[in-house]
């Protein structure tokens, strides 16, 4: 499962070894138990990667070979590529720009996108505190 955390000033992508439905249900139960209001909606999310790390043609070819139709790859300009995902948006504010977006893709595709993200952001190769194993 991929989890994108959108804040006012940043975006962070995590690779979780969780089932999407279970994670969303647990998050909803937690918010209910704390009295927190949370909104969940089916939606799309995007993030940018440098074209040098994410050659558009190669990524599109890989996604096509994996049979993934819920991910889009679009060139923004000469230097950047926009990755689009389909999943669920969770937020405390119905119209807010901050929140969490989650999606579930084939393990290999999630790992591939996460590795591209890490390469672009020079992050350690781990999530949830352990090295991810698919």
Image (cartoon, rainbow, N blue to C red):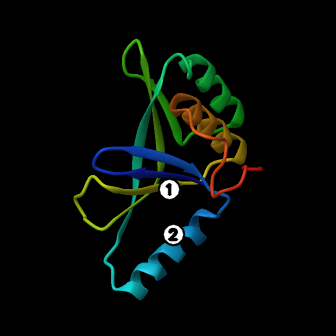
Q: Which residue is at the far top?
A: 78
Q: Is residue 23 above or below residue 105?
A: below
Q: Earlier in the sequence, mark 2 or mark 1?
A: 2
The residue sitting at the left extreme is 95
Residue under the image location 42 percent in, 87 percent down? 33
Q: Nearer the viewer, residue 66 or 13?
A: 13
Residue 108 image-quadrant placement: top right
Gap between marks 2 and 1 measured at Cα? 8 Å
- Report crowding for label 1: few under 14, some 14 to 19, many 20 or more residues within 10 A (C-alpha): many
2 and 1 marks in contact (CB < 8 Å):
yes
Q: Name the residue rendered at 52%, 75% in the picture.
A: 25
- 115 in relation to 24, above or below: above
Viewed as shown, does residue 38 lie left or right of 85?
Answer: left
- Specify few, some or many for label 2: CA neighbours under 10 Å numbering under 14, 14-19, or 20 or more: some
Q: Residue 102: which disc?
A: 1
Residue 4: mark: none
Would you identify the image quadrant in which residue 70 lies? top right
Q: Is residue 130 above or below residue 69?
A: below
Question: Mark 2 sits on what residue?
Answer: 24
Coordinates of residue 85 in the picture (x, y in percent) = 48, 43
- The answer to whether residue 8 is left or right of residue 25 is left
**Residue 6: percent from left, percent from top:** 37, 50
In what element is the residue under mark 1? Answer: strand
Q: Residue at x 27, y 49 (%)?
A: 8
SS class, disc 2: helix
- Indicate the position of residue 7 as horizontal and vertical percent values: 33, 51
Counting from the top left corner in percent of width and height, residue 64 is at: 65, 30
């Amino acid at each position: 499962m991929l989890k994108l955390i959108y804040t006012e000033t940043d975006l962070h992508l995590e690779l979780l070894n969780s089932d999407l439905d279970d994670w969303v249900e647990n998050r909803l139960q937690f918010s209910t138990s704390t009295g927190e209001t949370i909104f969940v909606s089916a939606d799309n999310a995007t993030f940018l990667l440098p074209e040098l790390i994410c050659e558009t043609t190669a990524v599109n070819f890989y996604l096509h070979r994996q049979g993934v139709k819920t991910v889009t790859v679009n060139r923004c300009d000469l230097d950047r590529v926009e990755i689009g995902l389909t999943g669920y948006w969770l937020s405390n504010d119905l119209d807010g720009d901050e929140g969490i977006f989650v999606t579930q893709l084939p393990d290999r595709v999630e790992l591939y996108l996460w590795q591209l993200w890490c390469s672009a952001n020079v992050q350690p190769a781990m999530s949830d505190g352990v090295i991810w194993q698919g």
